[in-house]
Image (tube, helix red, strand yellow):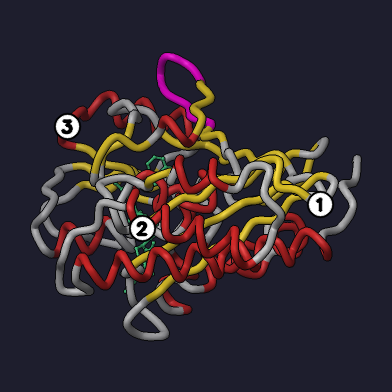
Amino acid sequence: MKIPGIKLHNAADLANACSLLEKYGESAKALAGGTDLVVDLKQKRAVFEHIVVLGGIAGLDEIKLRKGILQIGALTSLASLAESRIIKKHLPALSDAASTMATPQVRNMGTIGGNVAMAVPSADLPPTLIAANARIITDSPTGSRIIPIREFFTGPRKTVLGAAELIREIEIDVPPANSGLSYKKFQLRNSAALAVVGVAASLVVEDGKISDACIVLGAVAPTPLIAVKASRSLIGAKPDFEAFANAGKIACEEGKPISDIRGSKEFRCRLIGVLTRRALEEANGRIRTAPKRRKN
Ligand SMILES: Cc1cc2nc3c(=O)[nH]c(=O)nc-3n(C[C@H](O)[C@H](O)[C@H](O)COP(=O)(O)OP(=O)(O)OC[C@H]3O[C@@H](n4cnc5c(N)ncnc54)[C@H](O)[C@@H]3O)c2cc1C
């Protein structure tokens, strides 16, 4: 690949990529699948002299299950996420979210690391990753760190990542069998359309009552938003239509949508209510069919 005026550096491994980013400072950027970055370059929203290409780094595109933890390499493509048997079995909501994204071509190139690092408010993977309590594992010239995803996003296209810090992996504890998670998205077309609203919802049910819940709203605030009051309203309730519809109403009040070309503020508020209820219903349905947690 050649981009006029830009020097490409093929990183041998993640440590090499981090030191190249450190060396070239603000004039450098990492490139994974390029489905966001190349668009930004073409639209002149970003100007760089150096691009550090991550694509050739071995082992960063694997999905593993180790000791009850899902480990997803940063270069895992959206298509692999959508199709992975491990993800479909243990976290089907993430597979659903990936399969709603973009087009087959973009899903083949785009990566989970790029989607999370880009921090676009309408991005599809962050709400599910937040509801699943994921951890972001990073490397930088000063070492590695583990960042709870709930502390990762600081604003539109802004994260806590340092300039020479890269995502190596995303880790998620395999959800227990008495829990369920779902992602629901409304988009204006069936493909290649960003979320007008996206909602991820997780539920834990014990003795017929909800003991834990987390509702995360995408595309309705500068960062993915945990609907705290709506989530709390479910604790102690029976997992039924009434509780889910009530949580949807509360979530509508917690969202901070704006009007833009994809939908008005009022339309987005209504969508939050409907999608929250639907996500909770599907999460609840998944509890009954969830496989027993396995040790390996
Ligand atoms: C036609 C089209 C449709 C799309 N539809 C959707 C959609 O429906 N939903 C959606 O959420 N997105 C959508 N996208 C956006 C994009 O495809 C995804 O966000 C994708 O996951 C980005 O991954 P990438 O590997 O291509 O990132 P890149 O473009 O390579 O990088 C994006 C940013 O992340 C940084 N980055 C990449 N990897 C790492 C890493 N390991 N560590 C730290 N920083 C890193 C880069 O430096 C850059 O700033 C669409 C894009 C296009 C072009």
Separation of residues labelled 1 and 2 (CA atoms): 26 Å
Task: Examine the rendering and report whether any part of residue 244 can be seen.
Answer: yes
Secondary structure under badge 3?
Answer: helix
> Which mark identifies residue 66?
none
Task: Examine the rendering and report whether any part of residue 59 can be seen.
Answer: no
Secondary structure under badge 2?
Answer: helix
Find the residue positioned furthest to the bottom: 190
Location of mark 2 (residue): 252
Which residue is depicted at the point 31% across and 45% down?
223
Location of mark 3 (residue): 26
The image quadrant that residue 251 belongs to is bottom left
Q: Is mark 2 within 8 Å of ligand 1?
A: no
Nearest-to-viewer mark from 1 and 3: 1
Q: Could you tell whether 158 is left or right of 201 in the image?
A: left
Query: Badge 2 local density, few (<14 within 10 Å), some, or many (20+)?
Result: many
Who comes first in sequence, dot 1 or dot 2?
Answer: 1
Badge 3 amino acid: Glu
Nearest to the observer: residue 141 or residue 98: 98
Which residue is depicted at the point 36% across and 58% down?
252
Ligand 1: quadrant of the figure: bottom left
Main secondary structure type of the part rendered in magenta:
strand
The answer to whether marks 1 and 3 mark residues whose Cβ atoms lie closer than 8 Å is: no
What residue span does the magenta drawing correspond to?
Answer: 137-144
> Which mark identifies residue 208?
1
Nearest to the observer: residue 97 or residue 242: 242
Residue 151 percent location from the top left of the image: 42, 30
Separation of residues labelled 3 and 2 (CA atoms): 39 Å
